Amino acid sequence: MPTRHLLPEEIALLVDDEEGFGIAPLREHEASCALCRERVETERALIELIEHLPYAAPSAGFQDRVLREVQIFEPWHVAAMDTVRRLVPPPGPWRVVASAGLVGAACSMTAIVLWVSLRLDTVLYVTQAGLERAQSALISGAAAAVTFAFGDTVAAALPTAGAWGAVVALATVLGSIGLAGLGLRSLAARRVRGER
């Protein structure tokens, strides 16, 4: 028989009229302890009240309203698989067409990768030509901006300066525009302070 008061789990065993090896000492303690007997009787009365409560059906749409508010965590791999499943057509002729298209795309990509790896010198040549065109476009764009901002004399010196000269000239133009904007802003601020 326990020398302490009954724990909530032990009271629940007595209220449920459980049978077993450890129940007899609990029943003996309940019979000898007024406080524990009162707690067991209170629990039984509470369960009796709950069992006789009238059934109340939830209002229409209750489940939808509750589930709309519940945020369900979905792992990234489950979301990815769901997306893939939505993209795969149902069994039939469209699945065959989609499969043939995927196989064709995979074969084409394989052929392109093999061609590029076997013709690496051609890829390097095309890349270098593209970089040279980008460099000349940068220089001509900077020359146009410098011609517009500083005149033909400075623009004539730009092609001899090379790419770094174009970058310096463009940075100078952008810096001049930024300084002019700051100057106008400070003049406007002085004017506003002067009017007050």
Image (cartoon, rainbow, N blue to C red):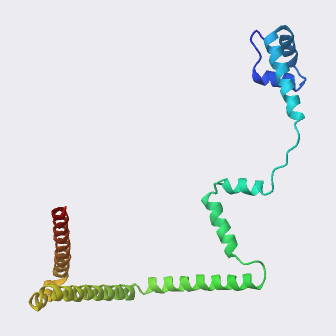
Quadrant of the image containing the N terminus: top right
For residue 7, side relative to residue 79 (left or right): right
- At x 89%, y 22%, the residue is 20
| Location of residue 162 (image quadrant) | bottom left
Q: Position of residue 41 (x, y in %)?
A: 85, 19
- Residue at 82% from the left image edge and 15% from the top image edge: 38
- Vertical side of 138 occupied by 193: above or below: above
Q: Residue furthest front?
A: 196
| Front residue of this view, candidates 23 and 144 | 144
In this view, the residue farthest toward the left is 153
In this view, 71 is above or below 124: above
Can residue 1 be seen here?
no
The relative height of residue 190 versus residue 180 in the rendered view (above or below) is above
Q: Quadrant of the image for the C terminus?
A: bottom left
Residue 158, position in %: x, y?
14, 86
Residue 111 in sight in this render: yes
Is residue 137 or residue 124 the one in the foreground? 137
Judge by depth and name the residue closer to the eye, 169 or 38.
38
Q: In the figure, is residue 123 to the left or right of 109?
A: left
Q: Is residue 111 left or right of residue 74?
A: left
Residue 5: % across, % down: 75, 13
Q: Position of residue 3 (x, y in %)?
A: 76, 9
Tell me the residue at 11%/91% (across/down).
152
Residue 67: quarter of image? bottom right
Which residue occupies 60% across, 60% down?
76
